[in-house]
Amino acid sequence: MVQIKGHINTKLKINSLIVVCVFLFGVINLSLFFNHKYNSLIFNDNISVVNNDFIGLKNEDNTSMNYSSNFDMSEFANVTSSKTNISSIDIDFPSPGWNLTKTEFNFTDISLKQETITLASENDVSNVWVLKNGDYESLAMQLKVTEPIKLISIDIYGFSSQIPEVEEVSVKITDWDTGNGIPDESTTYGDSIPLNISNIPNWFKQEFPEPIELEPDDYAIVLDGHPQIGNDIQYYWFINESNPNPLTMSYLDRKGIIFPTYEWESIAGDVFCHRITQWVNRSYKPSDINMTALINEISYEISDGVTEGYGYLNLFNLGYLIPGNSLHIEISTNQSIELTFNLNYTLSINNLELVDLSLKIEKGKKNVWEIIPFLERYPFYYSVRFQIPNNWFNLSVYKDEVEVISDPEITYQNYTLTINNDTITTNSNWLISAQSDPKNFTLSSQEPNYNPADEVDIEIATSFSTGEFIFLLFDSNGQEKFEETKIVSSPTETFSYTIRSDDIGGVWNVVVFWFNQTDAGIEIISFTVDIPFVLSPFSIFLISIISIGAVSSVYGSYKIIKRRKNLQEMRKRRIIDKCMDIVNLNHILVTDKDSSLTLFDKKYTDKV
């Protein structure tokens, strides 16, 4: 009977434990649900947000923003150099974008480079002479030189019956026998060269390996094929016979048949079609030939120097943007000649370069500005200048992380920072840092508390005329809800946000940054958002499931306990009934089953 009672107690404890666990499960779920809904009422002081890669919000006392922009760096250079034996001016620069402001050009040895003189052109052709074996084996043309020259080349207008396979005709310069009007081959000037010609009529250049110096006199241009010219080819040289000319042509004529001889004959006034390219040692004054320089499509006259062959051109305040990396200046004259000259020059150029600028705005601290220029060293005078805003202070200059503000090549006067070329080294890292006081402005909100569907209007009042505002709105969990950027356009700016029904309640914060290229500031304002408690359909469903489960568990446990109690009552009744049967006996006899011996024998005669 004791065992039965202990078993029943254990069952009751287990059932009670099940009921308690089910109840606690429901309570815990409800607690977690309510805690999730209302934890937003506690303001989080450790907000950490990164916005657009440059906003860092830590907390109200350590709110900061890192902003990147550009800063003007002015480059100045004086390029000084010289060039020799040129006909036009070409000056290269290390990079594009330079602005030419001043020129100092000094010209020397202004002279004729070379000129080509045409004695008879293809338009003057009236006949042709043939250079061939057994007939006219040499042809010549008088060359009259009136001043010292260097003969560079001779062009002839003609052709051959076929392309020559061997060098059998040569071109040479000889004396001229003025009395007889024929070449004097006893004296040759310079080198003889093979005739350059083909089987198509054209101009053919006969260029000497070295210019031939000739003094004023008469000379002969000789096409000499005697006696090596072959029978299978003829050479044709066009001639002008229609226009009288003071020059004389000549030909080597064959005399006799059995014992032939060759004699030079001449014809005055006839001119073979040819032109000569020569250099003449002839100096010029710029004014005599109207010498000009073309810069930015404007012709500037070159002034005369101290003597013939000298000139100069000084220009100021040009403001000419050099296209690309090279400055090209064409030199022109009113003569059909090509000049050569030497040049010494100094050019003043400048350039406006944008370099990196970073700004850190931090609540309760000074604004920190950092200029990060990339500086290159050049082989000419060069410097860079930064116009520092007058509200910046604590200026520092670092080169490879070493403070160099005291370097004599670095000056800071009247808010102008200048770094000269002598202190710039290749691949060095530069940093210019400064501070400024934060600028104040006013934030205001219409109400201290807002509900769902309310519009939050944050008004900014300021005296700033430039710059931009960055508006950031954070909920009570520190999550960014809204961001907007506006350019300053009026004394007041307004940012708006409508509270949503799914927003969380608590203390919300507005952070507004303002900055331009010289100043910056930050302001913060807070307001409260009240969100009424409304169970979501899912929460209602979850609570219903938990409640039904709890009720079902309790009811089931009750039925189990009731059935177990009924069984216990039935067992107890059976025991009592058996005991009552024993009580009603008058005689009890107990015997041994095997031996039939009497073990107990007693009569109850006194029972009622």
Image (cartoon, grey):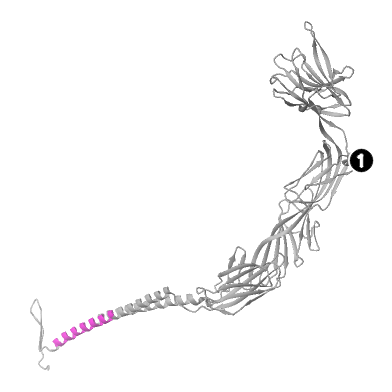
Please, what is the three-letter code of the amino acid marked with disc 1?
Answer: Thr
**Residue 569 is covered by the magenta coloring:** yes
**Residue 431 is covered by the magenta coloring:** no
Magenta segment's dominant SS is helix
- In-front residue for pair 111/602: 111
Question: How many residues crowd mark 1 within 10 Å: few (<14), some (14–19), many (20+)?
Answer: few
Q: In the picture provided, is 552 more to the left or to the right than 319?
A: left
**Which x, y percent locates residue 267?**
83, 18
Q: In the picture, residue 471 is in which quadrant? A: bottom right
- In-front residue for pair 340/602: 340
Query: Looking at the image, is 251 positioned above or below residue 440?
Result: above
Q: Is residue 209 in view from this perspective?
A: no
- In-front residue for pair 317/203: 203
Q: Which quarter of the image is occupied by the N terminus?
A: bottom left
Query: Looking at the image, is 282 positioned above or below residue 34?
Result: above
Q: In the picture, residue 372 is in which quadrant? A: bottom right
Q: Is residue 537 in view from this perspective?
A: yes
**Which x, y percent locates residue 282?**
87, 34
Q: In the picture, residue 552 is in which quadrant? A: bottom left
Query: Looking at the image, is 561 positioned above or below residue 145?
Result: below
Which residues lie in the magenta part? 559-582
Query: Looking at the image, is 135 positioned above or below residue 518?
Result: above
Q: Residue furthest front?
A: 242
**Which x, y percent locates residue 437?**
72, 70
**Which x, y percent locates residue 553?**
33, 77
* Residue beneath disc 1: 307
